Amino acid sequence: MEPVTAPKPIRLELPHATLAADLTLPTNAPGIIIFAHGSGSSRLSPRNQYVAQRLQQAGFGTLLFDFLTPEEDQHSEARYDQELLTRRLIGATSWVCRELRLFDLHLGFYGASTGAATALRAAAELGDKVKAVVLRGGRPDLAPGTLELIKTPTLLIVGGQDWPVVGMNEQALETLTSPKRLHVVQGAGHLFEEPGTLEEVADLSVEWCQTHLC
């Protein structure tokens, strides 16, 4: 297990916005995972932060960023604008691919809740540039027409007590044609607040990334 490298606050300069971000890059990282948080959340989501730290300890780089500017975040409709959010994730991916210290790293997406739809939409558009996708409590129903296009190995993690979302992920598993897996965390709700459940999510995420990003 690698010692955790301190995140570096950066500003993502995208074509139509400058966004706050935290980049962590362990020495000799084989890949970098870009996080897509759920609507109403931010790069400071404690659940995403925990999973990111576990990935960092496993030697992976991570990029967590705010998808909206503070001004945009004042408007609730922007938080649910999947077209806008997908463009932001693709923009962040392009930024990673232009950075000299990052461009040759294998690339993964980690999407939580509604951010899972954003990750799926971006992965469908980017094709084999994205080597791994992990979704936690995801809402694949918000990415209609994209699942059939995804080529990336995709792990779906859902809480056993998150009943509507369990069904959504079961349907997504049937539709996906890429390498795929659905894991139900028994006893967990949508936020994985129950003891040991988020740790299980992190274990699964690290294992998937070690398989597909190394």
Image (spheres, rainbow, N blue to C red):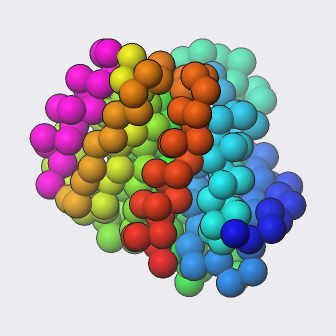
175 in the magenta segment: yes
Q: Does residue 22 appear to the left or right of 15 in the view shown?
A: right
Q: Position of residue 66 (x, y in %)?
A: 69, 40
| Residue beneath the point at 46% across and 61% down | 207
Q: Does residue 71 appear to the left or right of 190 in the view shown?
A: right
In the displayed structure, 44 sits above or below 177; it is: above
137 in the magenta segment: no
Quadrant of the rendered structure where residue 183 is?
top left
| Residue beneath the point at 74% across and 71% down | 2
Q: Is residue 68 visible?
A: no
In the displayed structure, 50 sits above or below 160; it is: below
Q: Position of residue 184 (x, y in %)?
A: 34, 34
Q: Position of residue 111 (x, y in %)?
A: 49, 43
Q: What predominant SS class does the magenta segment belong to?
A: helix
Which residue is more in the foreground, 87 or 160? 160
| Residue beneath the point at 52% across and 59% down | 206
In the displayed structure, 195 sits above or below 213; it is: above
Quadrant of the rendered structure where residue 180 is?
bottom left
| Residue beneath the point at 22% across and 37% down | 172
Range drawn in magenta: 163-177
Q: Does residue 141 appear to the left or right of 52 in the view shown?
A: left
Q: Position of residue 100 (x, y in %)?
A: 69, 84
Q: Is residue 139 visible?
A: yes
